[in-house]
Image: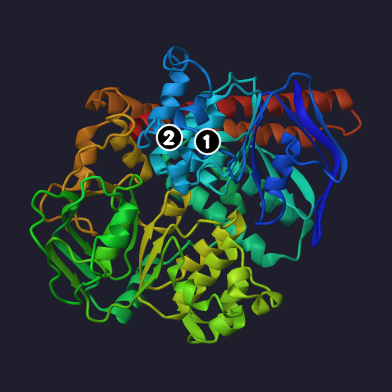
Amino acid sequence: MFLVGCEKVQVEVPSKTVLAGASLGVDAGQRIGIVGRNGDGKSTLLSVLAGSREPDGGRVIRTNGVTIGLLGQADRLDDASSVRAAVVGDVPEYVWASDAKIRAIFDNLLQDIPWEARVGTLSGGQRRRVDLARVLAGDWDVLMLDEPTNHLDVRAITWLAEHLKTRWRKDAGALLVVTHDRWFLDEVCNTMWEVHGGKVLPFEGGFSAYTMQRVKREQEALVAEQKRQNALRRELAWLSRGARARATKPKFHVAAAKELIADVPPLRDELELKRMAMARIGKQVVDLEDVTVAFDCEDVSEGDVDESGADGSGTRGGIASGGNGQGSRPVLDGITWQIGPGDRVGIVGANGAGKTTLLRVLEGELAPTKGRVKIGQTVRFAVLSQHLDNLRAFDGDRVRQAIARFPHRTMLDGKDQSATDLLERLGFSKADLNEPVEDLSGGQRRRLALMMILLEQPNVLILDEPGNDLDIDMLASVEDMLDGWPGTLILVTHDRYLMERVTDMQYALLDGKLRHLPRGVDEYLELVGEQGPGKRAEAAPSPGTKEGAAKSAPSAEADAVADGPEDGSQALSNAERHRLGKLVASLERKMETATTRIDQARAQMDAVDPTDFQALTGAQAKVDELKEALSALEEEWLAASERLSS
């Protein structure tokens, strides 16, 4: 059933044509992810389809009675309104309080915001969540969301994905979402639209399928953009070899991806990078010993802590200490952790859990209340903060003047890279060199800030939400660049795809404790999910960054095995594991046999007289039947494998 669409829509701005004759349709049951570079017109397309912007040419078509809910980039909330009024309007309390959907939205998006607070008193992130709650609380036929995951932590993003998957029945409603969160796109969407050069190209499937189709299209057309093609193929290498392909049900056949990337080298040579890192840093990077950070104000948020909770002191190669912190709230509680040369570490946690505080302790900017922080004598930190603090001094400069202040070469991919090389890899053109730094877009500023800290030639890189404001292509370029960086990497991000893509170990901050996550972000979500929204699972004392380096608790790997499945089912018995193992092996043999039969059927079809259409139709039907049987076996094998690995 058709819901909304457009015919030959034209949108122009003074400097360029954003949409050039776009013709699209949205049917009931479609879940569409919209991707493209910054400035290519993704948000414009949403606003045109939603009716909040009139096109310069063409027309927008809507079925009579269709309702559309839009989450724009900027909210239109009334500062004088209460949060309750902004979300549910004039609906009586007994109505919305008995609505399970409204309660779930409140529990997962607004649990830290007073229901009667005035909108004008909220922070930018809180306003964004209130606006998202307002849209989700409505009963819409078509939901259009522009960057809905902004200001959400990993748990809230996971809840939002599940909410959108179950919001309508299978063939009802429609969703259009603009986001750079690739995990979210893969989890929610069954169709992709790529906006580029004024055109909108549709692709079947989620982000993984879109990536593979895009690579195929470029290979078949033999396009000249070899660098871009290689970057996409490296994305597929991660999808096939990485945590997502191993641990979750893929949206496309991994075998097909492997065929495309057979000649692609590993994403990064971990041993060589560690060797180079040790040569640059030595054996010691940062050691935390029973570190506690506490603040006197019980209700202080993490952002407040970072701005006013420390004197900025720290130590290098020695002790950092403060008062005893009695009667205060611990943000970090007795953390013991070793970070070694070449370690690539990701840190996850809810908003306000203390992630930024931990980063400041690691770099020696914040003295702990108790415990010891030992920083290697040769360590040189470089920090990319959320607010791009390192760019403030250059706002009066042009780009070429800013980069002229730094060394002109740095080490990446085992060779020296010039500032010009880095600019090109990060999507800057020659014309951009004359742009004032203060006039750059958010994505350009973040890329420039990253390039500057790389040119400082640090050996420990701390990145706090580096993916903010970057489009998907630029994220891939940054990931590719980080793959060849020979140093210690510490990353904080709510983008789980980026987290698992560029780090080798993940840790969670839970109730002030640091817990190793052998199974990555999925394990973190299981831990926080045990106690429901807004609560924190009890965390074990932190292990070291290397297996076997834990100082005060059994290994997290042992904990994970002991905990068993987190979905409410009982742990598998030895007999059940044995049975499932035999089933998986049996299904693998059947899949091999089915593949052989398909090859034989195709050979028989090739031998058919090409003028005998009836025989050809029968041969094709046989091939299709065998392929359906193979697909059923693969589904059964995936289900059994996931159960066996749980």
- Relative side of 57 to 447, left or right: right
Residue at numbered disc 2? 109
Task: Give yes or no for contact between labels 2 and 1 (Cβ–Cβ under 8 Å).
Answer: yes
Q: Please report the residue visible at 80 percent of the width from the left and 60 percent of the height from the top.
A: 16
Residue nearest the observer in this picture, 74 or 316: 74
Q: Quadrant of residue 231?
A: bottom right
Q: Residue at x 29, y 28 (%)?
A: 577
Vertical placement of residue 54 versus 533, above or below: below
Given the image, on which type of amino acid does mark 1 rest?
Answer: Leu
Give x and y (percent) for residue 519: 33, 44
Mark 2 burial class by Cα count in 10 Å: few <14, some 14-19, many 20+: many
Q: Quadrant of the N terminus?
A: top right
One can see residue 351 in this view: yes
Residue that mark 1 sits on: 132
| Front position in the image: 352 or 257 | 352
Image coordinates of residue 3 in percent, x first then y, are 74, 25
Which structural element holds mark 1?
helix
Label 2: element kind: helix
Which residue is rendered at x = 29% and y = 22% of the image?
Answer: 569
Q: Is residue 590 visible?
A: no
Relative to 461, say whether 46 is above or below. Answer: above
Q: Locate the C terminus and report the quarter of the image it occupies.
A: top left
Tell me the quarter of the picture where residue 486 sits. bottom left
| x and y percentages locating residue 121 in the rendered image | 43, 43
Mark 2: which amino acid?
Leu
Q: Which residue is at 42% across, 34% downward?
A: 109
Q: How far across and down, in percent of the image, does residue 280 sit?
A: 32, 80
